[in-house]
Image (cartoon, rainbow, N blue to C red):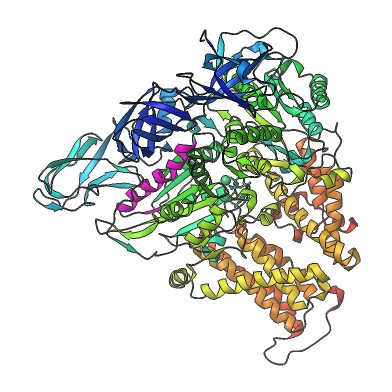
Amino acid sequence: MGETLDINGPIVTVRLSGVMNGEQIRIGALGLVGEVIGREGDRAVVQVYESTESLRPGEKVEALGHPLAVELGPGLLGQIFDGVQRPLRGLVEQGGDYIARGLSLPPLDRDQAWSFVPSPDLNPGMNLAAGTVLGTVQENPTFSHRILVPPDVEGELIDLAGAGDYTLEQVIARVRDRAGTPRELKLYHRWPVRMPRPYRRRDPAGEPLLTGQRVLDTFFPLLKGGKAAVPGPFGVGKTVVQQQIARWSNVHVVIYVGCGERGNELVDILESFPKLTDPYSGRSLMERTLLVANTSNMPVVAREASIYVGVTLAEYFRDQGYDVVVVADSTSRWAEALREVAGRLGQMPVEEGYPAYLASRLAAFYERAGRVETLAGTTGSITLIGAVSPPGGDFSEPVTSHTKDIIQTFWALSKELADARHYPAVGWADSFSAYVGAAASWWAEHVDPAWAERRAAALGLLTEADELAHIVNLVGPEALSPEQRWVLESASLIREGVLQQSALDPVDSFSSPEKQFVLLDLILEIHDQGRKLIALGVPVQQLLGLPLLGRAQRLKGTYGSDQVPSLRDFVQEIRAAFEPFYRDYGRGEGEPTPRAAPGGSFRRGKRE
Amino acid sequence: MREKEYRSVSAARGGLLFMRGVPGVALGDRVQVRDQRNRRRDGQVIRTSHEVVLIQVFEGTEGLDPERTWVRFLDRPFEVMLSPALLGRIFNGIGQPRDGRPPVIAALQRNVSGAPVNPAVRAYPREFIQTGISTIDGLNSLVRGQKLPIFSGSGLPHNRLIAQIVRQAKLPAEEQSRFAVVFAALGISHDDARFFRESFETSGVLQNVVMFINLADDPPIERLILPRTALTVAEYLAFDLDHHVLVILSDMTHYAEALREVATAKGDVPARKGYPGYLYSDLAEIYERAGRIKGRRGSITMVPVVSMPSDDITHPIPDLTGYITEGQIVLSRELHNQGIYPPVTIPPSLSRLMKDGIGKDYTREDHPRVASQLYASYARALNVRNLASIIGAEELTEHDRRSLAFAEAFERRFVNQGEEEDRAILETLSLAWELLSRLPPEALSRVTEADLARFHRGPSAVDEAP
Ligand SMILES: Nc1ncnc2c1ncn2[C@@H]1O[C@H](COP(=O)(O)OP(=O)(O)OP(=O)(O)O)[C@@H](O)[C@H]1O
Ligand SMILES: [Mg+2]
């Protein structure tokens, strides 16, 4: 027992000896919980997860003997937790509409019974390694929850429960550990959030994370086990990108960390996900999703903790051999929480008020992504995607620039694109992906061998068009050759017809890899045909007036991912639209037949 | 309340009192400060230990002599009395009457700090509010429970715009009596305050308005507590009394400046432009009090005014506001100088909750696509306008000339509207199509072919356009 000495916002200095850094402390009459972040003599500095209003010097404090840890077991999916894993729905029952302070509630329901099926090949007397799968619980129709021997336990199996219903506190197995002590294992265990969970080996990131978003998957791919950042000024679409990833990614589990952002955005997920279905399993999205929420009006210290809570939950599912994606919106708010604590501790700020350890903390966080061989010998992955909210949209600020050095895929959102309602506003000039090579082999094998070449061609057109637009802005469009005018048009087709993808359009919100490729291929086909015709002497003006172009831009919303064959048939329409020109101007291969343009009477591509 | 008054002030500066030797004072508690001339000020404990207690004084510390300053600790936080009798009244930042009438006495009191709404009980805002203003209804729709600030600048008509919103924002007739306004004036001029009062009066809502006033010549530190007091009242009206409350905070820039003043005096580490790193969280505590709650009939819709210092949208105050609120309506000096009212500049304006509040069930099926098309066509037209300014309009292609004409018409007819002009949403949409019809259908890729067939006025409209 000790007492509070100084209360400075979320930072409380206490007199309490013998505590460890990271240890949980309960404070005062309200029972607020916090964590030791510094010690000096018999004093400890505690950061408190809840508002410290009404706290006084001289109140009692108590060390809880353990660090901040999460509960891991059945019942996690579909839940919404706060930044220190208190179940928010449960808090409503206890505290009403507003989050009262000092409430404590176990994250997982103690009363619910789960139907446990033991692994058939385990027998008493066997030696069990950490991470061994003891059995499974069908947590919901989609998700089979594997019950693991915790990473810090190994030894001889004494006994294992038979198939049947168990609540979380019932013992389902006993293991005699190396020291000879019997350890009781339950359906859940705890793990400290600031300590990465162990695995056997790190593997290189594997196949692409398919998000169903064309500009991401086709242009700036991310791999399962990879790290990505989505920076951008306010209102350009970071949250929508992350929500789209949470909706459509080909993973088993999605962990959405709302870190210092809006309450309504979480409600949006809670209301919409149960009604949406996973394109792969056909089941409700909520069955594979869990939310960790510290909204911008909730206490900042819990905000700092929330991303560790999120990523530790992810590691637990990874250890079961699953692919997990974690989206953290926004890592900048986490960094700011860090800054606020550092400032109150009087630590030396180095850039824009941030402490010197910002970069290393960020790197350590992103290091928890990866594809691994688990302790049980299976493969699991965590893909980490962090939103970054640079002040004033300035990408040279500390959080963005440090993050950029850590991640491999960078989806730079541009205000200019967003202002023109070009969504997702991923700028092709500033974004990058270090995974293009690896992704290319997957696309070549599963979709089309021409993927890499088509992707490069499209990016080339976009870049060329940007340069041309520059020239136009200096000297006007007349300075451009017909070929260059056509490049501008084709780039605009790619922008409108491929890159732009409305999250709100039910047909276009998700795009299968096949649809992505076919769409791009068709539009490049138009470009190629047009280029040939221009070389044959067709005036570019005539091409620009083709209604085909408008139709091509609308293809994405016309054909769903289940209508790719019909989409492919559009190539007939392309041929038909260009055919009259070939008739008039010749095929090119043989003797081009240069002729005067068919006057103004050309029927602007109308076909009967 | 402690009987004892303490006289252990060791320093008084920058709105802060530093006191020694007052044991067991709780963080956030209210204090009364008495100066050498026996005048009273109100303060709040912002840091506390056995040795030192730090107090922020809402009336400022000007003229306080540490030797002759007495402090009484009230042993309770800042609270506001809550009762329906608040409607129609005017208060200062800590809830004391400013209208010469007696204080409101009520059994119910709440801490003005509020507590965060549990995200699990929020209801997603979806009901479209028709403001009768085309740039808002058509392109940046406001929904009940949204926080949608107006980014403005000195001399721009944000007050007139807000007054027009208050006048025209309609509730269904049966709910009209449940409409209330909470008006929080933060450092605005006497004239502006009077303007608001009169406009509430003429729109007949005065009886349903609660005003919290801190004027430009009132002590700035009081601005730190005023929005909290106002929002505690708004929450009471919305969630206890089922009102649909419109909260107007004008001007949040003055709030943030007061926060900086105190932060500097405390020696907090500055992040950008001298503003403390916690400005984001602090603003969020205010803005996030807007919303809807499951199972409650009322709502809090918030329209803060944020004036952009030097018209700079990347300045920390508008910037952090934009990161918290659900969109922003941005006013432009350029449009204002061209005589366009309201001078809403379209590209940076945004309503994030629009997507769920418009369309088939709320306004009209084509609304989302029309809005997106207007944005896209206007963005393109602005590029053309840029180009024309370099190479001259004569050099433009026919398509570009149409684009240019579209931009002119869009600004003059769609953006521009009378201060008394109340356009129904269908009028706004029809106007939108009239303008879009000046562009050829091929150029309208954000709308569907069915939309074009139904609403585009055909090639003749395109050809007639200059
Ligand atoms: N892919 C998309 N399709 C349709 N609309 C989009 C898309 N992406 C973004 N938007 C629009 O942009 C708005 C802002 O997006 P979002 O909320 O994701 O921005 P943000 O970058 O997260 O901003 P902040 O940093 O303030 O949180 C959305 O409300 C939506 O209207
Ligand atoms: Mg966001």
Task: Report if residue A574 is visible in the image.
Answer: no
Please, what is the dominant secondary structure of the magenta stretch? helix
- Is residue B18 shown above or below A560? above
A601 horizontally vs B127: left or right: right
* Residue drawn at the location 67% of the way across and 36% of the way down: B148
Q: Which residues are magenta?
A: A300-324
> Nearest the camera: A110 or A354?
A354
A481 horizontally vs A525: left or right: right
- Is residue A429 shown above or below A277? below
Give x and y (percent) for residue B207.
Answer: 74, 15
The part of the image, by quadrant, that contains residue B399 is bottom right
Q: Quadrant of the N terminus of chain A?
A: top left
- Is residue A232 shown above or below B267? below
Q: Quadrant of the C terminus of chain A?
A: bottom right
Give x and y (percent) for residue B104.
Answer: 65, 9
A137 horizontally vs A552: left or right: left
Give x and y (percent) for residue B208.
Answer: 72, 17
> Nearest the camera: B93 or A456?
B93
Does A309 appear in magenta? yes
> Nearest the camera: B25 or A546?
B25
A326 horizontally vs A394: left or right: left
* Residue drawn at the location 63% of the way across and 69% of the way down: A523
Does A382 appear in magenta? no
> Nearest the camera: B454 or A353?
A353
Task: Report if residue B429 is visible in the image.
Answer: yes
Furthest residue toward bottom? A591
Give x and y (percent) for residue A125.
Answer: 8, 50
Furthest residue toward front? B67
